[in-house]
Amino acid sequence: MKNQYFGDINDYRKYGLLRVLGRSSGLSIGVCWLLTAVGDGGDGELRDYLMKPAHWRRYDPELYDKLRQLGDQQTPRTVQDAQKSALIPNATYWDAVVPDDLAGREAYFTSGMSTLRSCELIFLDPDNGIEVNSIKRGTRGSSRYVYWTELKGVHNRGQSILVYQHFPRVPHGPFLQFIADRLAEELPASRVCAFSTAYVAFFLVQQSKHVRVFENAIEEIRGQWSTQIDVASLVTDLPRSVSHGR
């Protein structure tokens, strides 16, 4: 996550998703921004939706109004505005900048997960998403990703996970299933659900103890955010011997 992205259209959908998940499930939410330095490009300027309330406000009027008010301010945009404005009610945040180097990264996660230790659902918001083979953990550019070993650390503490994933230039359907299958394999005893939008996706890795409370939340998302957030139809919670054909 970069501060320059705050309040754009992807943020509106993201906060809307988290608000429904928290409200409907009753679970406490911890937000780990995986914050990185502001870039030089033009990313993060997708805010035209804030000028079109007739179309966009209906999905979450309270959230829309808050984001619009924050967008009118002359101060620099920052993820800390999410906490100050309670965009995600009763959430706990970890907003330190994640470094590239391995020692710094490990210290970041140690401190962050200690801060979020009492939360039941952890949202991880890397710039790009889950690790790729070409960029190893602890090397230049690794701050843009979350790594499997870090996801396992959260999962092993009994916390459910929502993780941001940017779409690469591949067909979306097979990509969603591929990542969901990998998540179910790496983080066993869980169910995986994918929420997709035009450019990004969010994967919900549900601890078995949380599956029931998430069912109602997922149905609420289908209704409230219809046409904006698609709940992908995936099969990821079968026994491994069945799902892998062995």
Image (cartoon, rainbow, N blue to C red):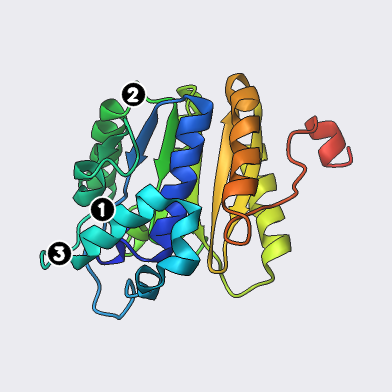
Mark 2: give few (<14), some (14-19) or many (20+) Cα within 10 Å: some
Quick check: can you spot residue 2?
no
Residue 191, image quadrant: top right
Which amino acid lies under the numbered mark 3 shown in the image of this protein?
A: Gln
Q: Position of residue 77 (x, y in %)?
A: 19, 62
Disc 2, SS: loop
Labels 1 and 3 touching (C-beta < 8 A): no
Residue 42, image quadrant: bottom left
Which amino acid lies under the numbered mark 2 shown in the image of this protein?
A: Arg
Q: Looking at the image, which residue is at 37% across and 56% down?
A: 64
Task: Looking at the picture, tell me which residue is in the foreground, 136 or 177.
Answer: 177
Labels 2 and 3 touching (C-beta < 8 A): no
Q: From the image, which quarter does the N terminus lie in? A: bottom left
Which amino acid lies under the numbered mark 1 shown in the image of this protein?
A: Asp
- The reply, left or right, for residue 93 in relation to residue 8 is left
Q: Position of residue 230 (x, y in %)?
A: 64, 56
Mark 3: give few (<14), some (14-19) or many (20+) Cα within 10 Å: few
Quick check: can you spot residue 66?
yes
Q: Looking at the image, which residue is at 84% across and 32% down?
A: 241
Q: Which residue is identified by label 1?
A: 101
- Give the Cα separation between the discs numbered 1 and 3: 35 Å
Above or below for 59 versus 204: below
Q: Position of residue 164 (x, y in %)?
A: 47, 53
- Give the Cα separation between the discs numbered 2 and 1: 24 Å
Q: Looking at the image, which residue is at 45% across and 31% down?
A: 121
Q: Position of residue 47 (x, y in %)?
A: 35, 72
Task: Looking at the picture, tell me which residue is in the foreground, 150 or 208.
Answer: 208
Q: Looking at the image, which residue is at 41% across and 49% down?
A: 15
Mark 1: give few (<14), some (14-19) or many (20+) Cα within 10 Å: some
Q: Which residue is identified by label 2?
A: 117
- The reply, left or right, for residue 216 in relation to residue 19 is right
Q: Which residue is identified by label 3?
A: 73
